Amino acid sequence: MQLDCWNIQGESFHFGRHGLGQEQTLATMPSDSLFAALVARLARTEGSQKATDFCKPFADGDPPFVLSSTFPFAGAVKFLPAPMLSRGGGAQGNDAKKLKRVEYVSEEIFRSLLKGEPLAKFFDEKLTLQKGKVLVGKKDLEKLPAELKKPEASIWDAEPRPRVTLDRATSASNLFHIGQVYFAKECGLWFAIRWVDAAPEKKKQFNDMLHELAEAGFGAERGVGMGIAKVHESGTLDLPEANGAWVTLSRYLPKEDEVSALGHDSTAYSIKAVGGWVDSPTNMGQRRKPVNLIEEGSVIGEKPPRDVPGQMVDVQPTYR
């Protein structure tokens, strides 16, 4: 399976969590949020009908492409989600806890895990970053930027950013905080796109949409400068085709005939309740319908019955 890769680099981002606690931010942008942002930007620049036409093949189950979620990169090293079936295996006690803390692994380790090797085989605290959340392969360690080879170095950091609102009537101020995530030099986010229909005009449309989104900003709090980024292609990633169990690189909503695979012995997954607000030029400030999605890194024990598994659903509110 060949995936085209893109890098995203900017000063700071806010990837909101569902709920009221805006002091927190995710470190990465999930696939469903990335796709929704592309569509919302298309609607703003070219109108709602253009966005509807763009979404139709996805809704009909015949998508021209599928997106991964965004994941961290550092220099020439891309990190991918550690497959859930591999975490904690082959270790006991404190070692097992340390393995379960690993969220991302470098490409070198990821390929070995796809072959069924346990994560414990590669774990070494000296090869971890981000307080144990990121595990680097020995060969990939040499490719990291020099700054990340220092003790306590981080690929990304998150901190609250103070904001102030003023009451229109009294001019009284109200202090609040918004979480922001920022990346070290030569670091950022990357994502992959798998083309099902690689027609030149479809690729051009996607490229135009992505660059337009980068100028407008990824994530929330774009009005105060967060999310502005530069994007560029960063090569291809060749991964083996699913031949039985497979690993998700994006959030995934199974179709009805795909749900049975979740009961397979070789399946390990987690579910995320995803909500939020409508971002549309015509319907703003309305809460969308929540949906439960299978998270990245989940292992599905059976090969899907179709080339592109999953489905697109309409989460806009029911208007009366």
Image (spheres, grey):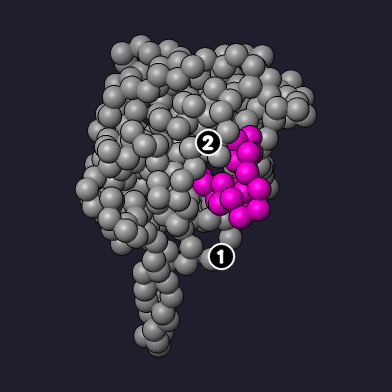
Find residue 34 and report its horizontal and vertical position in percent. 44, 39
In the picture, the disc for residue 121 is 2
Mark 1 highlights which residue?
20
Residue at mark 2 to residue at mark 1: CA–CA distance: 40 Å
Find residue 93 and report its horizontal and vertical position in percent. 65, 53
User: Is 305 in front, or is 220?
Assistant: 305
- The quadrant of the rendering that contains the N terminus is top left
The mark tally for this picture is 2
**Three-letter residue code for mark 2:** Lys
Q: Secondary structure at mark 1?
A: loop
- Does the image show residue 219? no
Q: Residues within 10 Å of mark 1 (few under 14, many from 20)?
A: few
169 sits left or right of 233 in the view: right
- Does the image show residue 233? yes
- Residue drawn 28% across and 42% down? 144
**Three-letter residue code for mark 1:** Leu
- Residue drawn 63% across and 44% down? 91
Find residue 181 and report its horizontal and vertical position in percent. 37, 57
Question: Magenta stretch containing residue 96, yes or no?
Answer: yes
Find residue 47 and report its horizontal and vertical position in percent. 39, 35
In the picture, the disc for residue 158 is none
273 sits left or right of 125 in the view: right
Examine the image and state in which quarter residue 38 appears: top left
Examine the image and state in which quarter residue 190 appears: top left
Q: Which residues are magenta?
A: 84-103
- Residue drawn 36% across and 47% down? 218
- Residue drawn 28% across and 51% down? 148
Asked if residue 28 is positioned above or below residue 240 in the image, the reply reads: below
Question: Magenta stretch containing residue 287, yes or no?
Answer: no
